[in-house]
């Protein structure tokens, strides 16, 4: 390695995980100095990759979505809609520019266009390439968990909600899949408002549109739904989320069905 190259070497972010054993090679610095051909230079320690892999495993991504990356997001030949290309581009830009991004992303569109694929693809890249502390939750599972917890005697509200507030990035999948009201809405609003106050980003997916009447012509069948996102999660939470996230409309045929015919696929 030439001296000039050595000078241009970028040190990775130093990472300290309180709960991990200190690496005997780099003592937690994440970088080691090696000598090659008489030239000493710094390089990332192997433990960096291991720590990121562990962090990704801790995300507990469902097996159905574990393969989802931004690179393998595909749409069927002839079926591709410009909105899918645009959504993929926005997801890619979000990851590339992170943490220098101001707003999260709210992927809106019908079942099967790949909203969840893109959302998990973003999480995977952020964890593996930038070591971002991400968390995700399925909207209806979260509500069920809250309700179940309250039905029991020893519900630890803090233990359930605190991680959702504290995560650097929170992804909420299938927002509005259940109608939310009363105290469950209060709890979720608390999580989102705390994140808003602390400028922590949210990524979400939803099958519900914001304004079905005006979007009807654009989205066809999808907009025949009578209910809007506000009907499902309440107007206040909806406007807070829209304030925090860039809306990304996605439309097209059933992406999941098309994916089962690989000869029709092309990478975008
Ligand atoms: Zn190390």
Image (cartoon, rainbow, N blue to C red):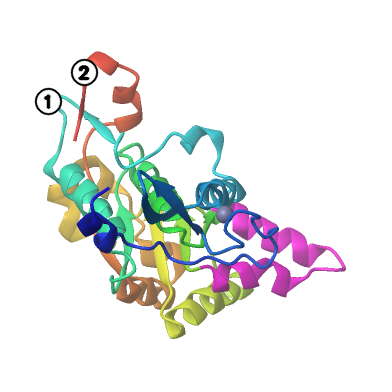
Q: Which of these two is toward me, 177 or 37? A: 37
Dividing the picture into quadrants, the one containing residue 41 is bottom left
Q: Is residue 60 above or below residue 246?
A: above
Indicate the quadrant containing the C terminus: top left, top right, bottom left or bottom right: top left
In screen coordinates, is 8 left or right of 32? Answer: left
At x 54%, y 64%, the residue is 29
Secondary structure state at the residue bearing disc 1: loop
**Residue 78 numbered mark, or none:** 1
Residue 80 in picture, x, y percent from top left: 16, 33
Question: Image quadrant of residue 208?
Answer: bottom left
Residue corresponding to mark 2: 264
Is residue 153 shown in magenta? yes
| Residue 183 visible (yes or no) | yes
Q: From what the image shows, is residue 26 above or below residue 154?
A: above
Residue positioned most to the front: 38
Q: Earlier in the sequence, mark 2 or mark 1?
A: 1
| Residue at the image position 44 percent from the left and 62 percent from the top | 232
Relative placement, left or right, of 37 versus 232 is left
Ligand 1 rendered quadrant? bottom right
Circle 2: is it few (<14), some (14-19), or many (20+) Cα within 10 Å? some
Q: Is residue 125 magenta?
A: no
Quick check: marks 2 and 1 in contact, CB under 8 Å?
yes
Residue in view at x 16 percent, y 49 percent: 86
Can residue 174 be seen here? no
Dominant secondary structure of the residues highlighted in magenta in the image: helix
Look at 35% across and 43% down and name the residue there: 37
Q: Position of residue 97 (x, y in %)?
A: 26, 63
Horizontally, residue 216 falls left or right of residue 38, namely left
Q: Secondary structure at mark 2?
A: helix
The residue stretch that appears in magenta = 140-167
């Amino acid at each position: 390695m030439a001296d000039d190259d050595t000078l241009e070497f970028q040190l990775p972010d130093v990472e300290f995980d309180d709960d991990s054993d200190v690496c005997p090679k780099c003592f937690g610095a994440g970088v080691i100095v090696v000598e090659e051909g008489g030239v000493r230079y710094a390089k990332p320690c192997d433990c960096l990759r291991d720590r990121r892999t562990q962090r990704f495993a801790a995300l507990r991504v469902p097996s159905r979505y574990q393969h989802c990356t931004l690179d393998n997001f595909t749409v069927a030949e002839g079926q591709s809609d410009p909105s899918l290309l645009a959504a993929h581009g926005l997801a890619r830009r979000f990851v590339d520019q992170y943490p220098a991004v101001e707003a999260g992303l709210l992927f809106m569109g019908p079942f099967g266009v790949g909203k969840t694929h893109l959302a998990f693809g973003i999480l995977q890249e952020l964890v593996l390439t930038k070591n971002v502390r991400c968390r995700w939750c399925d909207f209806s599972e979260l509500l069920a968990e809250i309700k179940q917890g309250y039905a029991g005697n020893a519900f630890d509200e803090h233990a359930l909600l605190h991680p959702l507030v504290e995560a650097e990035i929170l992804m909420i999948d299938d927002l509005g899949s259940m109608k939310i009201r009363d105290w469950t809405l209060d709890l979720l609003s608390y999580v989102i408002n705390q994140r808003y106050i602390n400028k922590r980003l949210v990524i979400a997916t939803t099958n519900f549109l914001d304004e079905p009447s005006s979007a009807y012509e654009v989205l066809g069948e999808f907009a025949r739904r009578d209910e809007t996102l506000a009907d499902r999660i309440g107007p206040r939470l909806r406007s807070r989320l829209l304030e925090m996230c860039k809306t990304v409309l996605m439309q097209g045929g059933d992406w999941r069905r098309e994916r089962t015919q690989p000869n029709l696929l092309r990478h975008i």
